[in-house]
């Protein structure tokens, strides 16, 4: 008997969770049943896919290769299911969406509400990841599409532009820059310290580029894990939080402890778009999702 799709799903679940018990919970099956299915798969392939130990399960080198190929198979099967369901012109089925943590929480709540109202049979599974991980997981099939900065993804991907974000500064009320709420020139930030996110967040690169252009510096003592963390550090005074507009408008401007001002400079922008594999047969469907995202983003920005 050949490996079944279900066995492939079990193997991927073990690869993602690192344990048989968590994989069983994720796939809604008993642990003994999952273990037996994996043993059956290994017996058929005549190879050990997992290294079993007291602390979990690790993929063997050949197991890593098999999982990479299994992800492609499962991705293509899921695309086939969605394509068949949507032959009537509607959106249905399950789609896995990866999002930047600097975008998702501030755009997706309204997007998911509108998508559910328009396409009640569509199930959107969302996961936040850094730019580096988004591309890897789009390539290996863990994501069907990603909400990211399109220029950071290869040319063999297709894109649908959602919104061009402006970049804002955020300072404490007693900061000299808080005397005005008008747009601020980049050169007016010379000599100041910018707060940034940690490694792997592309937005950190945007902030560092702006700091270099302005003659400012980036903090060597603090790297935030979220935009909320940067905002809270700015509220303590001294440093400047640099924030994208979806967050600045939907969150930071509501904080009475902070003053938010837009940076007026051509480089103080970033493009956000929906990105998917060029090989996907669902481009027309993804564009429908992109249109909803664009409409919501425009409403927030206005």
Image (spheres, rainbow, N blue to C red):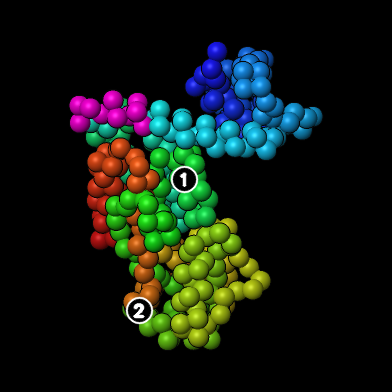
Question: Residue 110 lies in what quarter of the image?
Answer: top left
Give the quadrant of the N terminus.
top right
Where residue 3 sits: x, y (%)? 54, 20
For the residues labelled 1 and 2, the Cα–Cα distance comes to: 34 Å
Q: Is residue 233 left or right of residue 148?
A: right
The circle drawn on residue 139 is 1
Question: Residue 41 lies in what quarter of the image?
Answer: top right
User: Which residue is situated farthest in the front direction here?
Assistant: 46
Residue 84 lies within the magenta run = yes
Where residue 270 sits: x, y (%)? 37, 65
The circle drawn on residue 265 is 2
Where residue 242 sits: x, y (%)? 47, 70
Element at label 1? helix
Depth check: 178 or 40 in front?
Answer: 40
Question: Residue 8 lies in what quarter of the image?
Answer: top right
Element at label 2? loop
Question: What predominant SS class does the magenta segment belong to?
Answer: helix
**Nearest to viewer (mark 1 / mark 2):** 1
Give the quadrant of the C terminus.
bottom left
Residue 173 can be seen, yes or no: no
Depth check: 296 or 233 in front?
Answer: 296
User: Which residue is located at x 40 percent, y 29 percent?
Assistant: 78
Callout 1: few (<14), some (14-19), or many (20+) C-alpha neighbours within 10 Å?
Answer: some
Residue 211 can be seen, yes or no: yes
Residue 214 lies within the magenta run = no
User: Magenta segment, which residues?
Assistant: 79-89
User: Which residue is located at x 37 percent, y 80 percent?
Assistant: 184
- Closer to the chain start, of discs 1 and 2, is 1
Where residue 213 sits: x, y (%)? 46, 82
User: Which residue is located at x 59 percent, y 37 percent?
Assistant: 65
Depth check: 233 or 56 in front?
Answer: 56
Q: Is residue 281 left or right of residue 227?
A: left
């Amino acid at each position: 008997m050949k490996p079944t799709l279900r066995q492939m799903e079990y193997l991927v679940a073990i690869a993602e969770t690192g344990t048989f018990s968590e994989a069983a919970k994720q796939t809604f099956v008993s642990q003994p049943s999952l273990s037996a299915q994996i043993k059956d798969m290994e017996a058929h392939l005549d190879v050990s896919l997992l290294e079993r130990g007291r602390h979990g399960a690790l993929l063997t080198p050949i197991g890593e290769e098999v999982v990479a190929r299994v992800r492609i198979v499962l991705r293509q099967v899921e695309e086939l299911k969605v394509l068949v369901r949507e032959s009537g012109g509607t959106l249905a089925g399950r789609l896995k969406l990866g999002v930047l943590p600097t975008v998702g929480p501030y755009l997706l709540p309204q997007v998911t509400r509108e998508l559910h109202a328009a396409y009640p049979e569509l199930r959107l599974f969302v996961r936040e990841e850094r730019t580096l991980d988004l591309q890897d997981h789009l390539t290996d099939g863990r994501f069907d599409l990603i909400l990211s900065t399109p220029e950071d993804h290869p040319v063999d991907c297709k894109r649908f532009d959602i919104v061009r974000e402006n970049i804002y500064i955020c300072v404490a009320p007693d900061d000299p820059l808080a005397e005005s709420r008008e747009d601020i020139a980049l050169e007016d930030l010379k000599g100041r310290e910018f707060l940034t996110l940690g490694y792997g967040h592309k937005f950190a690169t945007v902030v560092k580029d702006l700091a270099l252009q302005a003659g400012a510096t980036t903090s060597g003592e603090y790297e935030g894990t979220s935009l909320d963390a940067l905002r809270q550090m700015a509220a303590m005074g001294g440093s400047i939080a640099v924030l994208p507009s979806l967050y600045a408008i939907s969150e930071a401007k509501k904080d009475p402890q902070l003053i938010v001002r837009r940076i007026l400079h051509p480089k103080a922008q970033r493009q956000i778009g929906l990105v998917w594999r060029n090989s996907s047969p669902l481009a027309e469907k993804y564009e429908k999702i992109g249109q909803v995202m664009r409409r919501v983003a425009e409403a927030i920005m206005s």
